[in-house]
């Protein structure tokens, strides 16, 4: 019975093995020496979703996956890649969901049109409420 | 016994709500006006019973009665008493009981204190309040009973999410709920006035204090929540456009618009239909928010228990109440006559512009929050977050600030454009000076939106105190002071937001005890790191001596470990100075005895919350001013009779 229990326990514990203390990604919490590049990287991180958290960007998450992604972004920025290219790479890898910045995909057109529509609708309504000088 | 008594109190309260609804209906429509006399007592008793039920649940938590399922799953006997107490609403069932309690107590307050409203409208309002309460009683009793027992009781509870174990939990949710659910009163007022066809200036004057009170509490609750997230999450952010934050922002936007349109209705008898619409929308947004959070269809840090059954229940309630109110609106609004149209240059027009812009922001936030759900239905997962909201809502908010500057300096009815421009001359000059200074000092280091934000904040700050210019300050009515302080608060808050996003300095280092770190004019001397223990946690604490030329100050960021449930949280150390905050977070140990530190210097970031508190204070002063005027008039009338 005992060996069986031990085996069972070992099997149940396998998920633990997945999160053993791998060394954290080198650039997860280390700034790029070049301030301009760091600003670019940071701006990008703030618009990338942490996939294991609940609605947080990778710029403000403690999750180890967010750290890995921050490191990836910093390394790519240092290698001279443009932020837009990195975003596209992340989207290709994880889907549109990973980017908080909505793309220009047709499915998102209504989202971009909504504020304009609302504003013009409001102005139209407003016009009806304003007295016109000439009629007086 | 306590749990059973609590459940009994809830059932009784629900029965009284039903009685209240039936009495009001029979009294107003059934030709039995003598029944109306019992409506107010029923409302008061119902409110008292919900308060009793809530007090009993708090007692169960304080006693750590593990035979109650809710206590066992959300509390722990080793927790400090404050978190046993506040933990009462740190879970789904408890927070819904708080919701129902606020609704019941608000209804009781309307029954006890409302004197200005016509009697039939008052009764119809109480009937409407009872009708909304009933749905939430049903939700609580049938799908979220907070008093359910567990047999056999576990030896101890599972504990409260350590992120919630903070004094913020004692303050933020109750205040927020008071505002959030307090808006149900405005909703009921609107329904009552539609039913009795009394949408007019007198009605608006009666409704205004209730809207103001709910709005003040909502403002405080959001401000507190933002500051809590800022220091607790440990990444220096203060607003994340998280669905739940949006869910609290949307009722606030609607309530802010309502507050201004109700003033137009009270003063000029205009915007009748629109004011009623806003009152319906404001509380509808509260319910939509609850649905989004409680159903778990949107992921959020606030989603305690994800349960599709509960989601459908709230969705049904939403459909009934919002649909019902809108149907009533459509049916009756034809009989509500709009007043005369406005002159183009008048305070009314600027208040309408305020309403328009607030509504557009509300629409943008609502669409942005729901959009991922809609695209998911088409099999396409997208995220809509800060980049979208900042880019769209930011510029609209700045336009709103300009209307805010001009509004109080424009006369009711009719004004001359030239005169308004003249009054805005000094604030505009101040704004231009500020933009020139800022351009010289920070050219190339600052984005367009933060730049405009700072300039507009300075100009609007000057414009918002202008109504006091050349007035005898002690003779100025309290509600004028309230308006000035609230508007100045908006400018202060925007200045804080813009300053934080423009001038924050971030420093990430891995440091050894003994190291000195230099950033943004500060020197941080990392003295040592040591273990310490609290009531239900152990922690590693870094001692840091911090200075920028003067005497050093001690800062102690911690990394806390909670055993139940097992979680690590970081407790940031904050040093507040007159011109900003230094924010230090202790991270994990990295190679070679070095520790990861995150350090931010955030110039004038505290203005964000100072502004929020000023906005709420302004609302409170306006409320006090209007009410005091009522008391004075009443007192004088009584003296005149004597």
Image (cartoon, coloured by chain):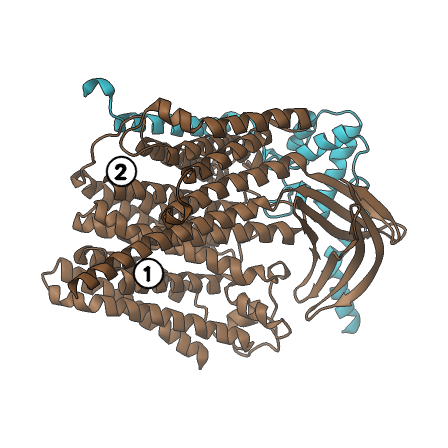
Chain colours: A cyan, B brown
Q: Quadrant of residue A50?
A: top right
Give the secondary structure at mark 1: helix
Q: Which residue is mark 1?
A: B133
Which quadrant, please, contains the C terminus of chain A? top left
Q: Which residue is mark 2?
A: B271
From the top left corner, tell me how far across and down residue B277 is, in percent: 30, 42
Q: Quadrant of residue A36?
A: top right
Q: Is residue B360 shown to the viewer in this render?
A: yes
From the top left corner, tell me how far across and down residue B103 is, in percent: 36, 61
Look at the picture and state if B278 lies above or below B136. Answer: above
Residue at figure coordinates x 56%, y 78% from the top left: B153
User: Mark 2 — on which chain does it sit?
Assistant: B
Total residue callouts = 2
Residue at figure coordinates x 19%, y 50% from the top left: B195
Instruction: Check the image and name the residue furthest to the bottom.
Output: B1
Q: Is residue B317 shown to the viewer in this render?
A: no
From the top left corner, tell me how far across and down residue B581 is, in percent: 67, 47
C-alpha separation, residue under disc 2 versus residue under disc 1? 28 Å
Q: Residues within 10 Å of mark 1 (few under 14, many from 20)?
A: many
Horizontal placement of A54 versus B176: left or right?
A: right
| Foreground of the two, B13 or B298 | B13
| Foreground of the two, B281 or B14 | B281
Instruction: Check the image and name the residue furthest to the left.
Output: B31
């Amino acid at each position: 019975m005992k060996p069986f229990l031990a085996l069972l326990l070992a099997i149940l514990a396998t998920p633990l093995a997945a999160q053993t203390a791998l060394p954290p990604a080198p650039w997860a919490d280390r700034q790029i020496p070049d301030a301009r590049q760091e600003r670019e990287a940071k701006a990008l991180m703030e618009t990338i979703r942490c996939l294991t958290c609940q609605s947080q960007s990778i710029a403000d998450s403690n999750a180890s996956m967010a750290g890995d992604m921050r490191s990836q972004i910093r390394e790519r920025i240092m290698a001279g890649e443009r932020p837009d290219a990195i975003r596209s790479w992340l989207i290709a890898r994880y889907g549109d969901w990973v980017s908080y910045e909505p793309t220009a995909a047709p499915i998102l057109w209504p989202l971009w049109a909504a504020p304009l529509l609302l504003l013009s609708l409001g102005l139209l309504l407003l016009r009806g409420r304003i007295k016109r000088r000439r009629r007086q | 016994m306590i749990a059973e008594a609590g459940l009994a109190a809830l059932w009784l309260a629900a029965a009284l709500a039903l009685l209240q609804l039936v009495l009001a209906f029979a009294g107003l429509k059934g030709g039995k006006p003598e029944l109306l006399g019992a409506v107010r007592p029923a409302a008061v008793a119902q409110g008292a019973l919900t308060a009793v039920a809530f007090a009993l649940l708090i007692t169960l938590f304080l006693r750590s009665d593990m035979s109650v399922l809710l206590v066992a799953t959300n509390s722990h006997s080793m927790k400090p008493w404050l978190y046993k107490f506040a933990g009462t609403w740190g879970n789904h069932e408890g927070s819904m009981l708080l919701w129902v309690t606020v609704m019941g107590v608000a209804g009781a307050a309307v029954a006890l204190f409302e004197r200005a409203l016509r009697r039939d409208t008052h009764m119809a309002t109480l009937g409407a309040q009872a009708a909304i309460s009933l749905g939430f009683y049903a939700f609580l009793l049938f799908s979220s009973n907070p008093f359910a027992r567990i047999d056999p009781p576990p030896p101890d509870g599972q504990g409260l999410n350590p992120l919630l174990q903070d004094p913020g939990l004692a303050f933020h949710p109750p205040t927020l709920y008071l505002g959030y659910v307090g808006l149900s009163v405005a909703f009921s007022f609107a329904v009552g006035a539609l039913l009795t066809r009394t949408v007019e200036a007198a009605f608006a004057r009666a409704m205004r204090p209730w809207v103001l009170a709910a709005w003040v509490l909502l403002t405080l609750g959001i401000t507190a929540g933002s500051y809590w997230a800022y220091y607790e999450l440990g990444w220096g952010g203060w607003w994340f456009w998280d669905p739940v934050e949006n869910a609290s922002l949307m009722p606030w936007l609607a309530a802010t618009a309502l507050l201004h349109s109700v003033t137009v209705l009270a003063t000029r008898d205009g915007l009748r239909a629109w004011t009623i619409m806003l009152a319906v929308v404001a509380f509808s947004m509260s319910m939509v928010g609850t649905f989004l959070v409680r159903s778990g269809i949107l992921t959020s840090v606030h989603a305690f228990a994800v349960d599709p059954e509960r989601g459908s229940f709230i969705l049904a309630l939403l459909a009934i109440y919002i649909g019902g109110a809108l149907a009533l609106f459509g049916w009756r609004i034809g009989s509500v006559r709009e007043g005369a149209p406005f002159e183009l240059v008048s305070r009314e027009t600027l208040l309408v512009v305020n309403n328009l812009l607030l509504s557009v922001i509300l629409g943008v936030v609502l669409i942005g929050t729901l959009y991922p759900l809609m695209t998911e239905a088409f099999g396409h997962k997208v995220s809509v977050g800060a980049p979208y909201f900042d880019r769209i809502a930011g510029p609209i908010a700045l336009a709103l600030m300009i209307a805010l500057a001009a509004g109080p300096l424009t006369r009711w009815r009719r004004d001359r454009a030239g005169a308004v421009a003249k009054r805005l001359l000094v604030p505009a000059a101040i704004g231009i000076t500020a933009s020139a200074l800022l351009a010289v000092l920070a050219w190339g280091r600052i984005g367009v939106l933060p730049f405009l934000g700072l300039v507009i904040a300075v100009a609007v700050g000057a414009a918002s105190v202008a109504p006091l210019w050349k007035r005898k300050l002690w003779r100025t009515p309290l509600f004028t002071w309230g308006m000035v302080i609230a508007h100045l608060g908006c400018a202060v808050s925007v200045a804080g937001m813009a300053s934080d996003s423009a001038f924050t300095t971030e420093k990430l280092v891995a440091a050894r005890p003994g190291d000195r770190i230099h950033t943004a004019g500060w020197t941080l001397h990392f003295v040592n790191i040591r273990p310490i223990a609290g009531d239900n946690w152990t922690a590693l604490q870094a001692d840091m001596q911090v200075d920028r030329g003067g005497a050093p100050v001690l800062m102690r960021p911690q990394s806390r470990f909670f055993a139940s449930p097992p979680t690590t949280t970081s407790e940031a150390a904050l040093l507040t100075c007159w011109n900003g905050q230094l924010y230090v977070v202790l991270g994990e140990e990295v190679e070679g005895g070095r520790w990861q530190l995150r350090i931010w210097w955030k110039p004038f970031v505290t203005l964000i919350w100072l502004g929020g508190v000023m906005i709420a204070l302004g609302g409170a002063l306006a409320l006090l001013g209007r009410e005091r005027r009522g008391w004075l008039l009443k007192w004088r009338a009584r003296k005149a009779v004597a």
